[in-house]
Image (cartoon, rainbow, N blue to C red):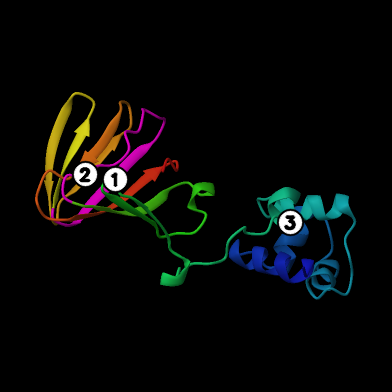
Amino acid sequence: MKIGEKLKLLRIRMNLTQQELANRSELSKGFISQVERDLSSPSIATLKDLLESLGTNLKEFFSEPENDEVVFRKEAVFVQENDDMGQVISWIVPNAQKNMMEPILLRLKKNGRSEIYGPHAGEVFGYVIQGSIKLCLGGNSHKVKMGESFYYIAKCAYHIENTTARESLVLWVTSPPNF
């Protein structure tokens, strides 16, 4: 990791000149310039002061994004079929359980249904891509047709069923991950 380059990007993102950063951190403009060009290395205390002036800290500065991947190819999809329940789950984002939300594609065969999920501190969203489903939410049920969506806070048990003769396909997202 090039500390100087990363500091420069932070400074520019904050719309600060080298002189403004120097004034905020009580350093010289020349020193800031040398650090940004990796000609000089700041002490930990000085780096900490610089980062505070830039609105961050050591932990955030040195943490690397865990997953730079943005696009997930078909080859990365994990599929699990459950004939007893008449469902096929496709995890379309690998390792999504470590993220803040988890999207899946749920294919329900005739009379197929999902697992019953208990209440949790989170939200649930779904979009029916094909067919129609019955959303069972607590003691209530709702018919959701192709092109329609559902959204709720998961305060009670829930699941979905396909009560039709046609196959249904649902994009289903939970936050936090729950599948």
Q: Quadrant of the N terminus?
A: bottom right
Residue 83, x across and y down, in percent: 30, 49
**What secondary structure do most residues of the magenta stretch adopt?**
loop
* Quarter-of-image position of residue 146: bottom left
Is label 2 in contact with label 3 (beta carbons under 8 Å)? no
What residue is disc 2 on? 150
Q: Is residue 71 left or right of residue 41?
A: left
Give the secondary structure at mark 3. helix
Is label 1 in contact with label 3 (beta carbons under 8 Å)? no
* Residue 100 to residue 166: above or below: above
Confirm whether residue 57 shows in the render: no
Residue 3, x across and y down, in percent: 78, 66
Type of amino acid under label 3: Phe
What residue is disc 1 on? 125
Between 27 and 124, the one lying in front of the other is 124
Which of the two labelled residues, at mark 1 and mark 3, occupies the earlier sequence position? 3
Give the secondary structure at mark 1. strand
Type of amino acid under label 2: Phe
What residue is disc 3 on? 62
Q: Alpha-carbon neighbours of circle 3 within 10 Å: few (<14), some, or many (≥20)?
A: few
Between 43 and 152, the one lying in front of the other is 152
Is label 2 in contact with label 1 (beta carbons under 8 Å)? yes
Confirm whether residue 128 shows in the render: yes
Type of amino acid under label 1: Phe
Magenta residues, start to end: 110-131
Taking the spot 72% from the left edge, 60% from the top edge, the residue there is 21
